[in-house]
Structures are given as structure tokens and as C-alpha cells.
Amino acid sequence: MSFVKTEKAGLMRDMSTKAIINTNISEYNYVLEKRKQSRQIQTVQQQIDALKNEFTDLKELILQLVNGKK
């Protein structure tokens, strides 16, 4: 496996696969952290959506109870 420098610093080309490889460890760690944050945001958004649905269901049940007693 041989690598050749590219015009952009931190990037190398693997001559056997022609793939561009990022050799900048701090950039790589930054991308991993951003992905982790993105997954956490998605999880929180899903939890918020689930809570909204539960509140809507509870509201409907309360309205049914109130309307049934009148």
C-alpha cells in the first residue's frame, strides 16, 4: 500500500485503491464528535416527539372523560 500526497494538507491518495485518505487525526476526531452529537440530537428529538404524542393522547382521554360526564 503506497500513499501519495495530494494538494490539500492532511489528505493522501492510496495508489492501490485510488481512495483519498484523511491522515489528520484531529480532523477525524472532530468528525466523530460531530456524528456523536448528531446522533444524540436525533435521539432527543425522537424522545420529544414521543412525549408530544403521549400528551396528545392524554389530552384526548381527558376530553373524553370530561365530555362523558356532562
Image (cartoon, rainbow, N blue to C red):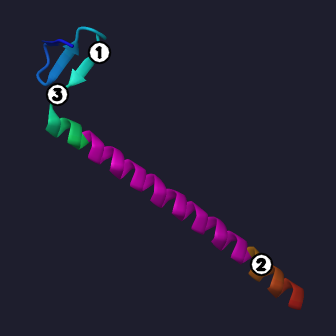
Which residue is drawn at the image coordinates 22% and 37% (left, top)? Answer: 28
Q: Read off the residue under disc 3.
A: 23
Q: Main secondary structure of the magenta part?
A: helix
Which residue is drawn at the image coordinates 57% and 61% (left, top)? Answer: 49
Comparing 55 with 38, the one in front is 38
Q: Amino acid at mark 3?
A: Thr
Quadrant in which the C terminus appears: bottom right
Q: Say whether disc 2 or disc 1 marks the residue closer to the N-terminus.
A: 1
Residue 61, numbered circle = 2
Question: Would residue 44 be counted in the magenta stretch?
Answer: yes
Q: Read off the residue under disc 1.
A: 19
Q: Quadrant of residue 62?
A: bottom right
| Circle 3 SS class | loop
Question: Would residue 40 be counted in the magenta stretch?
Answer: yes
Determine if residue 70 is in view. no
Q: Horizontal placement of 30 versus 40: left or right?
A: left
Which residue is drawn at the image coordinates 15% and 39% (left, top)? Answer: 26
